[in-house]
Image (cartoon, grey):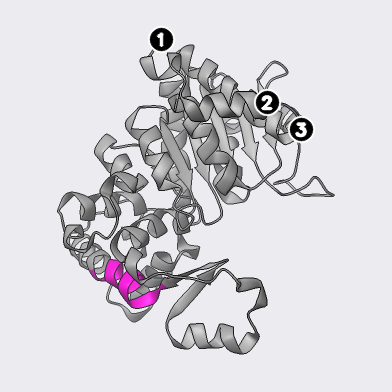
Amino acid sequence: MSKSLENTGAITEFIKHHYRHFNAAALVDAAEGYKTHLLNNGKMLVTLAGAMSTAELGISLAEMIRQDKIAAICTTGANLEEDLFNLVAHDYYKRIPNYRDLTPKEELDLLNNHFNRVTDTCIPEAEAMRRLETFLYEKWIDADKKGERYFPHEFLYRIIRDGSLEQYYQIDPKNSWMLAACEKNLPIFVPGWEDSTTGNFFTSYCITGEVKNPTTVRGGIEYMMELSKWYIETSKNSSIGFFQIGGGIAGDFPICVVPMIHQDLELEAPLWGYFCQISDSTTSYGSYSGAVPNEKITWGKLGIDTPKYIIESDATIVAPLIFAYVLGL
């Protein structure tokens, strides 16, 4: 048993004392289940939807990665890039606490000043997006000329490892989950990367002809192939849990790898050994993101006995608390 899972600190004790019912109790149950899963030699895949990186989830997520509490991540392209946007341009971000009161004219003013708003936080285009684009462009063009192909996260790992971004760091590097993931060479899966800002950049270069081969950046089908290979190999020695932050493609993409392995490849592999979803998407007709975990039994993703948790709350509040609990803080 690792020391961090044996010990409990002030945050954990506070949660245990006060979080006794409803979504608060579900948070404790999910956190305890996460710890139990790891203590039983389990591995955890974490999925990142929404704008978790702009919400600076990296402050807690990075430590989870460093302490081997996360074995793989499935994320949207937005969260992949936005962690690095924050890393190199944090001082230029603009926070707008009264964002609900903004008029359309004020929204247009933000656009004209090259700020893109995510709820109460505006990302600066020049200092964040275009800065990263400069280094990605070099990697894309170089790989394209050499006939090499890499996944989106691998291109970012290459930029991190060559030190290109270090001169621009504006936060403590320990709070970047991408830096932590790169240090661990963590498996990352990024479905639908092309709908991200950097995905749009790459598409534009393909249209202009600066990038000759659009498959220089490897895509979703190959990511699913890599995920299936990772799942089959990892599950030989460890049960794999599924910790889903938000809904959408970040969660939908990886969870279906198990029925694909069973039904389409006709191979043996265990079901997911733990499931938790943090979401404020309520159950409704046809809402996959709001579906209760039991629905996944009918799709061959979870078993009857799989520990299942759903916390209907704000992930920016819940996820750091669960991570603190798992870390014994």
Taking depth in this image into account, of 235 and 117 the one nearest to the observer is 117
Q: Nearer the viewer, residue 146 or 180?
A: 180
Position of residue 214 measured from the top left corner of the image (x, y, whole percent):
36, 65
Q: Which residue is mark 2?
A: 308
Please state if 285 lies on the left or on the right of 294 as rendered. Answer: right
- The residue under the point 67% across, 29% down is 19
What's under tag 1, amino acid-wise?
Met
In the image, the segment drawn in magenta is 124-134
User: Alpha carbon of mark 2 to alpha carbon of mark 3: how far?
Assistant: 15 Å
N-terminal-most mark, 2 or 1: 1
Query: Mark 2 or mark 3: which comes first in sequence?
Result: 3
Amino acid at dot 2: Lys
Query: What amino acid is found at the position of numbered circle 3 in the picture?
Result: Phe
Q: Residue furthest right?
A: 285
In percent of width and height, residue 258 lies at 58, 29
Residue drawn at (22%, 58%) of the image: 147
- In front: label 2 or label 1: 1
User: Residue 255, labelled with which disc?
Assistant: none
Residue lying at 50% horizontally and 83% vertically, measured from the top left: 110
Q: Is 130 one of the magenta-colored residues?
A: yes
- Residue 212 seen in the figure: no
Spatial CA distance of label 3 from label 1 is: 30 Å
Vertical relation: 58 (above or below) 301:
below
Disc 3 is placed on an element classified as helix
Earlier sequence position, callout 3 versus callout 1: 1
Q: Quadrant of residue 245?
A: top right
On residue 1, the disc is 1
Quadrant assignment for the N terminus: top left
- Where residue 22 is drawn, which disc sits there? 3
Is residue 113 depicted above or below 319 in this figure? below
